[in-house]
Amino acid sequence: MRSILTALAATTLMTGAAFADAHALTGDMRIVSDMSNPAPRAVMEGLVEQFGELHPGLNIELEIVDRDGWKGQIRNALTSNPPDVVNWYAANRMGPYVNAGLFEDVSDVWGEIEGLDAVKGALTIDGKQWGVPYTYYNWGLYYREDIFAELGIEEPTTFEQEIANCQVIIDSGRKCYAIGTKFLWTAGGWFDYLNMRTNGFDFHMQLARGEVEWTDDRVRETFANWRKLIDMGAFIDDHQNYSWQEALPFMVNGEATHYLIGNFAVAPMRDAGLTDEQIDFYQFPLIADLPQGEDAPIDTFHIPSGAANKDAAREFLKFVTSAEVQTAINGPEVKEGDEVVKPGLGQLPVNAASAVEDDEFLNQGFEMLTTNATGGIAQFFDRDFPAEMAAAGMEGLQEFMVFPDNLDDILERLEQTRQRVYQQ
């Protein structure tokens, strides 16, 4: 941890004095974080240690919880002995906790920070801000560049080319796509992209707002495009039994060539032994001639309304949104042998004054989001749809991937759920 702390301190030294001088923080501070994967955990632990050194009178308790488990635990945590800071998500996913009075209005914090204007809307409800962002990340198709070269195929720009490539891959004895749908949300990523490419970003968001029936022919067209891949055997078998991490070895071992996933998966790919010469990335190809929408979820920190040490919590939110800290935590992880000498989320800083690390995949993702996502930026299926609709939807999406002949029943159930959820 000392090397991690040193790496963070090197980039926060100048602002650290300002943070420390601003308030003499004392007492206890509790943080519950869902940054449970190894690289994010190292970043979170480094952040807490650095913030603690800036405020030696503060006793900080950090609890790391499982990322998927936290989705079912957060409401209880916010209502029973709430901590001072929690991790969560922007946009629709924070809505229930704002509406229930469980998140603190932090508009005053936004009045003291700069560089976050581009994402302010995603943290705003009723004209007020209810959390701060610390990272966001692009999604896309990560693939085995060395296998593409072996098979003589190139990055596609259209869905027809994608399918043609996939057939070559299948003919070579491999699967096209690794995926683990045990926790459902990865299937949501596939639907997001297929629907945005088939019908456009605006239509996708209309569906998310409950303005379109799930039985609409345009939705069926999205599933028809998806089924083209399912019927040709493009996805690994038994994906419903794997988490996204458990499915990663299929790509690492060359049994599958692609993974539609967020940039957070690059660090585990590297840790598993893949080099940057073996991995590459491309934007999900065009289906219809429509502006391209992209998934770029924003991860956030919030202060529970029942927090005991809101002064310390507010200072922590200012700390993690500073340009220097954003640069430090969002770069790629750096190792010397097996030792992590610089932690990194391997994602994109949200603060506009931050620097993007010289990393191939971060640079590609940043370029894509800033120049070629003219359709719009989505937050991801389980964040853009209301929680009950998202849960039912992702169950239906996983079922479709395993039993595509069930589509009519799935869409009827989802339409019934839509009518109930959006009339509440």
Image (cartoon, helix red, strand yellow):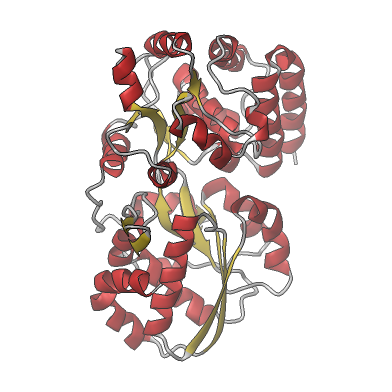
- Please provide percent x and percent y for residue 222: 55, 16
Q: Is residue 391 left or right of residue 371?
A: right
- Please provide percent x and percent y for residue 295: 45, 36
**As displayed, is residue 305 above or below residue 163?**
below
At a point 35% along the width and 22% down the height, the residue shown is: 147
**As displayed, is residue 239 above or below residue 32?**
above
**As displayed, is residue 178 above or below residue 225?**
below
Q: Quadrant of residue 402?
A: top right
At a point 55% along the width and 57% down the height, the residue shown is: 36
One can see residue 337 in this view? yes
One can see residue 129 in this view? no
**As displayed, is residue 238 above or below residue 404?**
below
- Please provide percent x and percent y for residue 220: 61, 14
Please state, as top left, top right, bottom left or bottom right, where the N terminus lies in the image.
bottom left
Residue at the farthest front position: 337
Q: Quadrant of residue 54?
A: bottom left
- Please provide percent x and percent y for residue 39: 44, 56
